[in-house]
Image (tube, coloured by chain):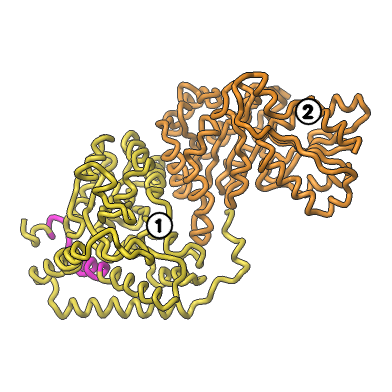
Amino acid sequence: MSNELLFQELGLDNQDLKKMLYDMILIRKFEETLKQLYQQGKIHGTMHLCIGQEATAVGACFPLNNEDKITSTHRGHGHSIAKGTDVNKMVAELLGKVTGHCKGKGGSMHIADMKVGNLGANGIVAAGLPLGVGAALTSKMKELGYVVLCFFGDGATNEGAFHESLNLASIWKLPIIFFCENNLYGMSGSIKEMTNIESIAVRGSSYGIPSETINGNNILEVIKATQDAVERAKQGNGPTLIEAETYRWEGHSRSDARKYRTREEEKEWKKAKDPIDAFKEILVSNNVINENEFIELNEKAQNQMKEAVEYAEKSDDPSLDTLMTDIYA
Amino acid sequence: MREISYSEAIKEAMTQVMREDNDVFIMGEDIGVYGGAFGVTSGMIDEFGPERVRITPISEAAISGCAVGSAMTGMRPILEIQFSDFVVIAMDNIVNQAAKMRYMFGGKAKVPMVVRLPAGSGAGFAAQHSQSLEAWMTHIPGLKVVQPSNAYDAKGLLKAAIKDDNPVLFYEHKMLYNLKGDVPEESYEIPLGVADIKREGKDITIIATGMMVNHAVEAAQKLEQEGIDVEVIDPRTLVPLDEKAILESVKKTGRVLVVYEAVKRGGFGTEIVSLIAESDAFDYLDAPILRLGGVEAPIPYNPKLEKAAIPQVSDIYQKCLELMNK
């Protein structure tokens, strides 16, 4: 199918396409900015960058509306931005400021924004899956009609919570999408060393869940798979497992020297499979944007990040008397 | 007033709240037609159907996480963990998710859920089905921990727990399920954080939890014949803890025995002893504070060994005599 026909089939107009490209660029600029802030000593603790995984975040969230929910992972900045979480408040949270999404109490791994259906990043691998199952159960029991999309990595699929959650969602036919960003490594453990199967998608069949493996760096493929899964969920046909193959360009966290993989492998993914470049090419060749507009989008994202950092840096630290608030409702 | 069992009181609490509030539902293993491992939910599926009396696979990790996820999106789940020992498999969702979510999201989430946990020894279930691990939960900020010692309290406390907007761990003692007591039919709540004086006295304060409250009252009745007047305080909720009620009683009697079924080392009674030692009630003590707790061994199978593993009425009796002579 030509890309133009594919756009039509996916119901995407030029405005959608530009918005998605912008969101992908914004995620990358966000992560690059954070990296700089970290190097300047302005961010303490750690963080997990998702550069290289912009297409899965934006593509998977595109078919969702504000009522639909996501659960996210420790590598969750992209998911939050794609779901519509305020970027200023995200940077403020990473700087530990009171204006941050969690008043400076959560940090990188606990950003949540209930208003846009972002049920939160999670510091525990695979923990978002049963939470997502619960949110999907709410949707079903209260007949709210929303779907839940759970992001997780390949490493999470070896946790018991993954298997139990798929089974539970399947027997209860819940409106949920299990979305695996297979970036080939769970910290330093490669998927080849940690599993003895051809693809993660085969795990869905054990639970009677329709599953597929897609190119997670092609946003149109991501949208197609997610749209189908949303449709299935909203028709009451239960969960879907999507395995999206992608790659994180950076290390697991800021302390990772990446000794477990080759620079050649990294180069291949960065040069030949950059999801932003790939999407841009499609849009340019279909006359949706031109080179100048692409540069403009980059500048716009860069400026948005500059404003976000200014907002965060101008914000106050939380006062010490908030130490003991928000513990109990 | 009519008498019903502890188990029936728990069922009545759930039934009454579920009739009032459609967001409340229960889930757990075998809680449907089977009625749960201890029969607590028997018949509930007939009234509320399989949607709201939701049987689950044997998947503690997923069902506990599912409870958290449904609670943070608008439901009020009651999760039955078949034996409290199995909560170990669900700990991530209780300790890392439910307890911390509100705080780490800056107050933007609430997690109104109850986890019902049949605990304690005495039934011959041995080491993996008989533990009293409630102290673990009291160590986690964000959780509330309830431990009713009779049917009346069980009903009132459970209703309050279900209506609470926080995760509440509700410890039921397996040996109390058949114990009958006066329980009003009408709806009532016992607020979390309010202790009860199960018996008034002036010579010794026994602070006991769970099953041990009943043992302490029985021992107190026997001690009366020796001329010793024992006051028995039941905190009823470990978190929040009614510190005032405990300290007032200590000041009144000047002698303290703390009795709990959990392993003595690191059990919740240790916390109560520390509370007293750090307070102005310490000045009122006429004798060292004594503790009675479970032995530092897993719960054994043999009935004689099992009985020896946790405090009995006679142990409490002896300890009180000892305390009076100090």
**Dominant secondary-structure state across the stretch colored magenta:** helix
Q: Is residue A123 visible?
A: yes
Q: Amino acid at mark 1?
A: Ala
Which of the labelled discs sits on residue B202, or is there none?
none
Residue A12 covered by magenta stretch: yes
Furthest residue in direction right, as rendered: B227
| Image chain in orange | B
Q: Residue drawn 31% across and 45% down? A: A157
Q: Residue drawn 51% across and 37% down? A: B87
Q: Are marks 1 and 2 on the same chain?
A: no
| Image chain in yellow | A
- Residue extent of the magenta highlight: A7-24
Q: Residue drawn 42% across and 52% down? A: A124
The image shows residue A299 at horizontal and vertical percentages of: 26, 80
Task: Quarter of the image for the C terminus of chain B: give it.
Answer: top right
Q: Which residue is mark 2?
A: B315
Numbered disc 2: secondary structure = helix
Q: Which residue is mark 1?
A: A121
Q: Residue drawn 55% across and 46% down? A: B167
Within 10 angstroms of label 2, few (less than 14), some, or many (20 or more) residues? some
Within 10 angstroms of label 1, few (less than 14), some, or many (20 or more) residues? many
Q: Amino acid at mark 2?
A: Asp
